[in-house]
Image (tube, coloured by chain):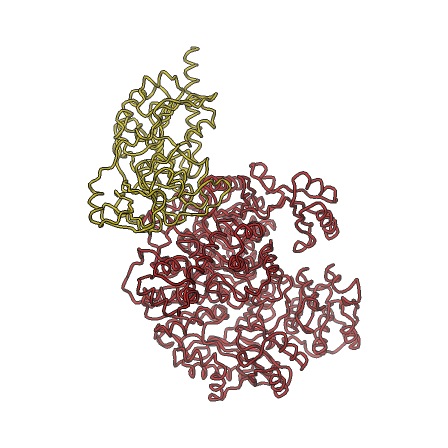
């Protein structure tokens, strides 16, 4: 069946429908990863977005049981040059098409995805719609432009209730703004006793859990759409070691008095170089963000820049000068993407360890 | 870390001649390295023995030494130039070996030369089997389990422990003799028993077989600050078992999930960190298709063939970055030259799929064993880029120039089911096409997977392509046409399938607007703006070409490296492009060889990485609208396209098509020669066996016979009598009125060759080359000498006169190559090639005349005089230069090494010195000959050669060589008073002459062709044995004489006092 992808500027791409047949709206973004489509489409940070993969052959290794980053995908559409109908991999259980049908997500295939990517690069991310309607273009563009995109993504993807993944090590409160499974995986791998809490958790509720540290997860959308989280962080900052990832990083920055801004088309992919300023080392990182912490907003705060994007100089990591808190804009949990930054979890663990020792030390003294 | 300040002058070692396994990719890498170093203000000194390269152009380095790459000569250059640093990691295995040798000899330390790039210890750690295994164990990186055994029982115990299949590799046997794969205990016992017998130290390596696993490669880079990146990963369609150089490869990997991709990426980075690589490195993996289990197969601690491919596949210039890392830069301070804004410390991402298919020499070596295995056999490769797998692979097939414009080969339909099955199991060069054939016969994907172990993903894709053929056969619709084009089908194949004409399909396509657009290769999948003028076609919507409105000329490249069409043509192509740019034109290049300098996106104003197939070329010309197309630098590839292009209204720049035809069409050419009163060897065209016999008798034996329908000396032979002629006519060719055979008198004489430039009026002859081997040996396989050493001034004047006349008569605009034979003091024209030749780079370098540049400008209308050159014969240089061919016989089993009319060499080296003997010495050493100054000469020559051989044998004897010969030759030599040790022929039982060669008793083997190329013949086996044991094997008396000339010059002979002798016979018999 014929499907159309329409952008707010009136550009139209005609392709073939796959996945669910339904009309869907969302912000159109592109991801440059060569592999990892399953992790991408199940990453809650893409909630409400229509995601284009720049690599033209998607679905080659199918869908497997283990590589989901959330219990279900939250994307509003998936755009590919070609989706594989006969995938091949030992872990494969079903096709991309079947997965999208299962979760009622529309897909469009066969379009010039490079042209779409270039358009987004020039104009920035745009609103778009996938439809199988044969209505006149002008009508569809009008309908698209009349639609307001959602701003409550975090509440949609965050856990509704507290749950724990018991471990024998440090107790970590993972504030779920749309956390990828990868973060949990990295924590449990390190024997952490993880308690996952909803995004609207209060400082008091966290204190009751008596954690050794707090991890602010990734998540979708604009950090300014979750003001209660900023409040919570401001209140609890300094009480426990804190590590922020992606949206968690932005929220930590806002809570520390800095500001965030929307980028032209963001960073999405697994090949982004990030320079760690204290060591001078550059790491290839997995990224997915539309917003960034504004560099000039750091003046007067206690935040120090620790990481920058090598290519555009945007802030990729900060730490608090006085308190046990740091954050990165990218994804040390990978999935998808390179494993190079896993050491940040070790740093977080070390921070919790030191804090604990200091506490015990203080007590004995 | 910025560059090291103490480095001012750097010596770069090239890779030497092109051989199988080490080809043009090192010219590309070396050229990039030289450019990168010069960019940083370094003084660059280069040593490379290969004259056919761009890197040995004098503008590539501050000082260029075209000298043998041996420790002796490199040390000499080091002492002379006193460089601060040595960069060996861009010159292939040759460069690395040289660095190790120089370091071990203490030269680097003595001369205070710093080794740049990866440290020697790291190189050794990567290359030494034991050190590598222990490092992998330390890192916890899995390598295939193995054990060294000296009894059968040990082998069986090991196999019981790890399971079958098992690979057995006997220690120290050549080419894996006696080894094999064992599926069960019975075969294991058998093979190990024989392997132990073959092994001189009674040892076998028993290894777990990983054949059939996925083969995955990672190209990685690291700098001194420990920044690491992956440039590209690649997946071999052929599973483990076929050498990666012989495998069809795609980039990026297609069947790996992110977990598998990242698992191997992490492993690759761990390995280069542990090794401390500073520069580029390649890691090869075997990945179990049913689990996360993987094995590290190999690590190449240097820039390799795969890195050239990865560079072209991604746009990321690995060699250039590796050179900068070697002088101290780190990746995060280097800009990505493709985008100009982002940094080199990132991982390229692709939004297209790249396919590489090797090009094998089996069209030339029909008797060669075509089976693919662990020894690489391909001479070159093609690469193609597409937005779908189907499009990419179809383009690659068209680029191969093997007569296929679709995923099919002629004759596949006649293969029996049994043969088809066998050839699918044991891969040979045609397996891709056989898969397609099997699918056409209705074999299932599962069946094919069981036979080949090729991943189902690829088999499904092939199946889709074949299924679509049937779809098209049902009738063409607009939708199907578009779909077919997006799957890479040619108009021609679509037309064939749906019963239309190609023209009709083409017209329909144009009418519907189904024309390709051109997309950019930008390293970043369009995330950043890029400036690279590097394009590929796709049936998509948006075209990314930027119209400049400038006048432009398209140069056609020469496609994959193959025997007969080597790197020399890439050299000429690159020079033509440079000349065009100098002349103010925009230079556009079309080529598909990832190994070359011409496909470096920096070379031209616009690079189209596309097949040199008429439809693809026309699509480009339709949008480029050039002033014209230059075809004379791209070898036969480009010339073959000329008439098709002209027929479509494209202007061919340079020598006109009619005149090209006049030189290539035998009848027209004969008429022209008659008119100019220029002699050529008498000959006849025959269409039956009877006519052939009559013609040969009329001309007188020996005669040169060849079919008229094949090019490049294929199936050409010299026959000495009627029975040989009959055998040839019956076995080697099919003769009928449609396929005439040419019979020429074979004139035993000196062969000479001339390259000239003509602007339509004036002719510039940079030089004449004289061949050491007599006419009858392909000019590409002969040692060429400049300036001529034995030709009289009168003969030279005649050659000059004939060249000038022919160039004018053919109204040549550009280059021209003529081959002559001088018979009884009279020159005859053998052939005229109205285009760039194999000798252009050599002659350009030894005379200092930039031939391709002048020719290009002549093509553009600038006369030779206007360009500041004097027409006529350029004054001869005083230095003597020789061009010596290099062969890859050790890699090609069952190929006869005898020199003849068919070309067999894969590369060449140059020797330049004050005298012929010294130049020859350098040339032979550079070609890899280990010149024995004493020892034993084994002689076994054909009757017709005995008389002539006698003098040569005497001269060897005089130098103190012992003589060995088989009965017939021994009788002859003894009659002449020489003392000879007799050895048995093969039929006479053991020990025989093979054993003598095998044990190393014979240092030099002089063997001339008896007849027939069938592997059973004694001569064939003798020659093969010599090659496989590294003995010097001479199959031409002329080469023997030249070698003697060298030996007589470099060694002293001891003489008894009184005997009065004639003057020393030092003149080379040519």
List x then y, in percent, for residue B211. 59, 48
Relative to B728, A193 lies left or right = left
Side of B69 where A282 appears, left or right: left
Determine whether, in the image, residue B859 is placed left or right of residue B151: left
Q: Residue extending furthest front? A: B474
Quarter the N terminus of chain B occupies: top left
User: In x, y percent, where is residue B1068?
Assistant: 63, 75
Left or right: B532 with respect to B496? left
Q: How many marks?
A: 0
Asked whether residue B629 is in view, the answer is yes
Q: Nearer the viewer, residue B301 or B366?
A: B366
Q: Nearer the viewer, residue B689 or B870?
A: B689
Q: Residue at x 65, y 46 (%)?
A: B166
Q: Is residue B675 above or below residue B512?
A: below
Which is more toward the observer, A239 or B76?
A: A239
Residue A298 visible in image: no
Q: Which chain is yellow?
A: A
Occupied quadrant, residue B296: top right
- Residue A203 falls in image quadrant: top left
Where the C terminus of chain B falls, by quadrant? bottom right
Q: Is residue B45 above or below residue B787?
A: above
Q: Quadrant of residue B70?
A: bottom right
Relative to B536, is B225 above or below? above
Q: x, y percentage for residue B317?
A: 42, 52
| Chain letter corresponding to the colour red | B
């Amino acid at each position: 069946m014929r499907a159309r992808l329409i952008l707010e500027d009136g550009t139209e791409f005609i392709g073939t429908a796959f996945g669910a047949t339904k009309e869907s709206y969302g912000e159109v973004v592109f991801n440059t990863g060569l592999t990892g489509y399953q992790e991408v489409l199940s990453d809650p940070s893409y909630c409400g977005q229509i995601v284009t993969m720049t690599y033209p052959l998607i679905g080659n290794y199918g869908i497997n049981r283990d590589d989901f980053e959330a219990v279900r995908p939250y994307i509003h559409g998936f755009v590919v040059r070609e989706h594989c109908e006969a995938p091949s991999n030992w872990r494969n259980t079903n096709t991309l098409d079947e997965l999208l049908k299962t979760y009622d997500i529309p897909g469009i295939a066969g379009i010039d995805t490079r042209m779409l990517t270039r358009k987004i690069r020039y104009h920035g991310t745009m609103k778009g719609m996938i439809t199988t309607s044969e209505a006149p273009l002008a009508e569809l563009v009008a309908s698209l432009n009349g639609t307001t995109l959602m701003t409550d993504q975090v509440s949609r993807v965050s856990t509704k209730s507290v749950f724990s993944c018991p471990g024998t090590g440090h107790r970590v409160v993972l504030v779920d703004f749309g956390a990828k499974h990868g973060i949990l995986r990295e924590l449990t791998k390190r024997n952490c006793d993880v308690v996952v809490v909803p995004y609207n958790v209060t400082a008091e509720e966290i204190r009751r859990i008596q954690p050794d540290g707090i991890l602010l997860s990734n998540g979708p959308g604009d950090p300014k759409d979750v003001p209660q989280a900023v409040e919570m962080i401001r209140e609890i900052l300094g009480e426990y070691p804190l590590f922020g990832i992606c949206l968690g990083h932005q929220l930590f920055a806002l809570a520390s008095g800095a500001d965030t801004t929307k980028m032209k088309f963001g960073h999405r992919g697994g090949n982004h170089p990030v320079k760690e300023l204290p060591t001078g080392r550059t790491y290839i990182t997995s990224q997915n963000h539309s917003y960034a912490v504004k560099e000039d907003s750091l003046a007067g705060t206690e935040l120090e820049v620790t990481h920058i994007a090598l290519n555009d100089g945007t802030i990729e990591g900060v730490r608090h000068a006085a308190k046990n808190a740091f954050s990165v804009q990218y994804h040390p949990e990978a999935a998808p993407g390179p494993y190079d930054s896993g050491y940040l979890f070790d740093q977080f663990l070390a921070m919790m360890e030191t804090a604990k020792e200091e506490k015990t030390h203080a007590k004995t003294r | 870390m910025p560059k090291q300040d103490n480095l001012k002058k750097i010596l770069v070692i090239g890779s030497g001649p092109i051989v199988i396994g080490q080809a043009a990719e090192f010219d590309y890498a070396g050229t990039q390295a030289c450019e990168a170093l010069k960019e940083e203000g370094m003084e660059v000194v280069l040593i490379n023995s290969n004259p056919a390269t761009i890197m040995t152009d004098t503008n590539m380095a501050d000082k260029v030494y075209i000298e043998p790459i041996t420790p002796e000569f490199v040390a000499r250059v080091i002492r002379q130039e006193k460089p601060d640093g040595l960069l060996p990691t861009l010159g292939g295995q040759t460069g690395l070996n040289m660095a190790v040798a120089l370091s071990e000899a203490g030269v680097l330390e003595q001369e205070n030369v710093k080794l740049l790039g990866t440290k020697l210890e790291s190189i050794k750690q990567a290359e030494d089997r034991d050190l590598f295994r222990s490092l992998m164990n330390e890192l916890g990186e899995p390598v295939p389990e193995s054990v060294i055994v000296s009894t059968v029982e040990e082998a069986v115990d090991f196999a019981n422990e790890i399971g079958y299949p098992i690979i057995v590799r006997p220690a120290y046997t050549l080419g894996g003799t006696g080894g094999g794969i064992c599926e069960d205990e019975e075969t294991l016992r058998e093979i190990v028993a024989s392997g132990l017998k073959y092994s001189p130290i009674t040892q076998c390596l028993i290894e777990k077989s990983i054949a059939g696993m996925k083969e995955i490669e990672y190209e990685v880079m690291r700098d001194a600050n420990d920044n690491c990146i992956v440039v590209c990963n690649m997946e071999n369609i052929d599973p483990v078992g076929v050498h990666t150089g012989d495998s069809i490869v795609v980039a990026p990997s297609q069947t790996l999930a992110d977990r598998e991709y990242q698992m191997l990426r992490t492993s690759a980075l761990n390995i280069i960190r542990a090794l401390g690589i500073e520069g580029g490195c390649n890691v090869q993996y075997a990945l179990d298709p049913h689990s996360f289990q993987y094995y590290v197969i190999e690590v190449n601690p240097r820039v390799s063939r795969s890195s050239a491919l990865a560079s072209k596949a991604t746009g990321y210039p690995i060699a250039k970055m590796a050179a900068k890392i070697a002088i101290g830069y780190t990746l995060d301070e280097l800009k990505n030259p493709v985008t100009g804004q982002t940094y080199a410390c990132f991982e390229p991402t692709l939004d297209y799929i790249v396919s590489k298919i090797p090009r094998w020499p089996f069209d030339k070596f029909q008797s060669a064993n075509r089976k693919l295995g662990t020894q690489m056999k391909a001479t070159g490769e093609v690469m193609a880029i597409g937005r779908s797998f189907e499009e990419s692979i179809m383009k690659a097939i068209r680029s191969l120039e093997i007569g296929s414009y679709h995923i099919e080969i002629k004759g596949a339909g006649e293969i029996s089911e049994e043969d088809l099955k066998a050839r699918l199991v044991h891969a040979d060069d045609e397996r891709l096409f056989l898969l397609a054939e099997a699918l056409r016969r209705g074999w299932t994907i599962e069946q094919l997977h069981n036979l080949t172990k090729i991943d189902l993903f690829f088999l499904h894709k092939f199946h889709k392509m074949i299924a679509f053929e049937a779809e098209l056969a049902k009738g063409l619709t607009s939708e199907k046409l578009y779909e077919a084009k997006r799957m890479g089908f040619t108009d021609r194949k679509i037309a064939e399938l749906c019963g239309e004409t190609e023209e009709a399909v083409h017209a329909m396509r144009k009418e519907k607007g189904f024309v390709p657009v051109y997309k950019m290769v930008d390293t970043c999948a369009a995330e950043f703006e890029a400036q690279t003028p590097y394009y590929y076609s796709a049936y998509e919507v948006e075209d990314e070409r930027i119209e400049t409105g400038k006048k432009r000329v398209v140069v056609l490249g020469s496609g994959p490296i193959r025997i007969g069409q080597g790197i020399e043509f890439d050299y000429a192509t690159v020079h033509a492009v440079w000349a065009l740019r100098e002349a103010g034109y925009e230079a556009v290049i079309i080529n598909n060889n990832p190994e070359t300098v011409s496909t470096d996106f920096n070379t031209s104003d616009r690079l189209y990485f596309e097949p040199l197939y008429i439809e693809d070329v026309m699509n480009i010309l339709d949008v480029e609208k050039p002033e014209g197309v230059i075809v004379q630098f791209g070898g036969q590839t480009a010339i073959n396209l000329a008439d098709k292009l002209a027929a479509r209204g494209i202007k061919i720049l340079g020598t006109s098509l009619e005149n090209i035809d006049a030189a290539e069409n035998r009848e027209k050419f004969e008429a022209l020669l008659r008119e100019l009163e220029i002699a050529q060897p008498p000959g006849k065209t025959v269409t039956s066996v009877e006519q052939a016999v009559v013609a040969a008798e009329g001309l007188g034996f020996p005669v040169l016979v060849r079919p008229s329908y094949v090019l490049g000396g294929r199936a050409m032979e010299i026959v000495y009598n009627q029975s040989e002629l009959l055998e040839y006519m019956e076995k080697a060719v099919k003769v009928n009125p449609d396929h005439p055979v040419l019979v020429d008198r074979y004139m035993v004489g000196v062969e000479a060759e001339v390259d000239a430039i003509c602007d339509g009026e004036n002719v510039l002859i940079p030089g004449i080359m004289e061949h050491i081997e007599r006419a009858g040996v392909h000019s590409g396989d002969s040692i060429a000498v400049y300036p001529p050493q034995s030709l009289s001034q009168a003969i030279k004047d005649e050659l000059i006169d004939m060249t000038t006349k022919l160039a004018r008569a053919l109204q040549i605009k550009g280059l021209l190559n003529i081959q002559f034979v001088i018979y009884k003091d009279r020159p005859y024209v053998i052939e005229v090639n109205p285009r760039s030749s194999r000798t252009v780079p050599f002659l350009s370098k030894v005379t200092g005349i930039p031939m391709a540049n002048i020719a290009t400008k002549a093509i553009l209308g600038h006369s030779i005089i206007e360009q500041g050159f004097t027409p006529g014969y350029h004054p001869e240089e005083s230095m003597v230069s020789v061009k010596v061919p290099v062969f890859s016989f050790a890699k090609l089993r069952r190929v006869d090494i005898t020199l003849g009319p068919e070309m067999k060499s894969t590369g060449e080296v140059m020797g330049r010195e004050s005298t012929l003997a010294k130049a020859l010495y350098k040339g032979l050493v550079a070609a890899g000959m280990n010149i024995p100054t004493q020892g034993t000469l084994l002689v076994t020559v054909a009757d017709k050669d005995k008389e002539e051989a006698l003098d040569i044998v005497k001269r060897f004897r005089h130098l103190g060589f012992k003589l060995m010969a088989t009965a017939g030759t021994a009788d002859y030599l003894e009659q002449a008073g020489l003392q000879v040790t007799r050895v048995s022929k093969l039929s006479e039982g053991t020990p025989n002459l093979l054993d003598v060669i095998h044990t190393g008793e014979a240092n030099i083997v002089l063997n001339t062709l008896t007849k027939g190329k069938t592997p059973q013949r004694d001569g064939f086996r003798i020659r093969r044995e010599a090659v496989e044991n590294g003995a010097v094997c001479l199959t031409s008396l002329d080469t023997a004489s030249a070698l003697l000339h060298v030996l007589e010059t470099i060694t002293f002979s001891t003489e008894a006092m009184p005997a009065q002798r004639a003057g020393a016979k030092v003149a080379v018999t040519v």
